[in-house]
């Protein structure tokens, strides 16, 4: 557990946000996914959530956010106040100039509402990586150098350079570093950038990454104090039993991850023990350590404990729930917890 260096917080003291993986549902279309995302974004905006992020993935039947920048613009265009952004853009897949131009365009269209989170993972397999990048040659310093190049394109000082991001230059777009290990935590600390940890699927290094980030943070012109966010899974319903039933879609999705399958999100089932083996169950439950399932009362206790242990500045929630209305209801339960 992280040493108690911050003031204790209640859930209502910190922002809550959404990570939408634009999940494709079995038997539904990609167009249905986008309609559901717009509907969810409108609801959580009304309920006071701070941001709505989408993540770059490729060649996956289950995720429809491959053209992440385009989808961010689509969500931003159907909302009015909530921040919309990338959680994240996998920077090694792109030339930094292209990302600067895309997010400069988004920020120009939706001023004061765009976030840019950067990851160094591929968001895909090796074959797809090659199709995206054309080359897989990558030195140890390439990601940090790409981050600095991207930041330079957004700076006013780049106005005299031969290569410029227009639009983009001089715009105040918050840039986050995302991670599932300690690498990006250390880089975010050195560069004085906000940091988001992917504890919704990679819980192992959460505590170490947060500790490393906070202890090594160096203030920058963009951020004077460390600011960290943890993403978790939440499936909330009226009762623990109902939430447990809804969660079986998520467990099936997780089984796909460990077996390399990317099929669309499946409907819930009554008995997971008929589907997974004991080793599969153990692996999934370990991977989904920071998954909170249950009624409002159950979720509130678990989330407060998580906040006590991590002392994060913000919690981001993702929810793999097959039924769209049940998904909306899950976020409404969370919104009500944040009002208490």
Image: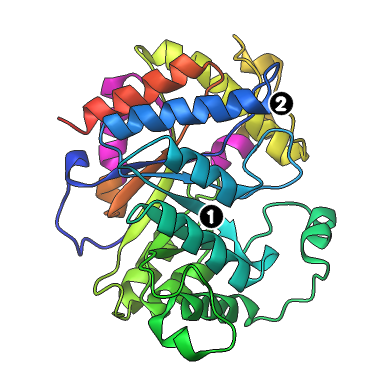
Q: Is residue 28 above or below residue 107?
A: above
Mark linked to residue 277: 2
Q: Report whether residue 45 is seen.
A: yes
Q: Residue at horizontal 53%, vertical 71%?
A: 183
Mark 2 and mark 1 in contact (Cβ < 8 Å)? no
Sequence-first disc among 1 and 2: 1
Quadrant of the rendering where the C terminus is positioned:
top left
Q: Report whether residue 252 is seen.
A: no
> Given this view, does label 1 or label 2 mark the residue nearer the observer?
1
Q: Which residue is mark 1?
A: 88
- The part of the image, by quadrant, that contains residue 44 is top left
Residue 11 x, y percent position in the rendering: 22, 40
Residue extent of the magenta highlight: 283-306
- The part of the image, by quadrant, that contains residue 326 is top left
- Whether residue 233 sits left or right of residue 123 in the image: it is left
How would you rate the neighbour count of disc 2 (Cα within 10 Å): few for under 14, some for 14-19, many for 20 or more?
Answer: few
CA gap, disc 1 and disc 2 = 33 Å
Q: Residue at horizontal 66%, vertical 71%?
A: 95
Q: Residue at horizontal 21%, vertical 60%?
A: 4
SS at mark 2 in the image: loop
């Amino acid at each position: 557990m992280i040493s108690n260096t911050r003031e204790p917080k209640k859930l209502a003291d910190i922002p809550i946000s959404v990570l939408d993986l634009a999940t494709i549902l079995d038997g539904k279309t990609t167009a249905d996914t986008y309609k559901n995302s717009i509907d969810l974004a409108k609801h959580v905006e009304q309920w006071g959530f701070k941001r709505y992020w989408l993540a770059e993935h490729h060649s996956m039947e289950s995720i429809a956010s491959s053209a992440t920048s385009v989808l961010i613009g689509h969500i931003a265009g159907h909302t009015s106040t909530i921040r919309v952004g990338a959680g994240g853009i996998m920077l090694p897949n792109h030339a930094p100039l292209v990302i600067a131009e895309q997010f400069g365009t988004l920020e120009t269209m939706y001023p004061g509402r765009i976030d840019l989170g950067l990851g160094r993972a591929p968001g895909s397999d090796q074959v797809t990586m090659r199709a995206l990048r054309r080359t897989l040659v990558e030195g140890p310093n390439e990601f940090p150098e790409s981050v600095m190049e991207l930041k330079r394109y957004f700076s006013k000082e780049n106005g005299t350079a031969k290569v410029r991001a227009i639009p983009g230059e001089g715009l105040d777009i918050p840039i986050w570093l995302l991670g599932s290990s300690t690498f990006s935590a250390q880089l975010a600390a050195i560069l004085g950038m906000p940091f988001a940890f992917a504890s919704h699927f990679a819980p192992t290094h959460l505590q170490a990454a947060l500790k490393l980030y906070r202890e090594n943070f160096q203030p920058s012109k963009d951020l004077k104090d460390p600011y960290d966010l943890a993403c978790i899974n939440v499936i909330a319903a009226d009762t623990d039993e109902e939430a447990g039933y809804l969660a079986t879609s998520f467990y099936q999705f997780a089984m796909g991850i460990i077996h390399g399958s990317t099929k669309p999100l499946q409907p819930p089932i009554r008995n997971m023990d008929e589907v997974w083996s004991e080793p599969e169950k153990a692996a999934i439950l370990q991977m989904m350590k920071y998954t909170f399932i249950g009624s409002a009362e159950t979720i509130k206790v678990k989330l407060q404990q998580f906040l006590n242990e991590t002392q994060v500045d913000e919690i981001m929630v993702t929810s793999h729930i097959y039924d769209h209305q049940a998904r909306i209801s899950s976020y409404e339960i969370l919104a009500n917890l944040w009002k208490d």
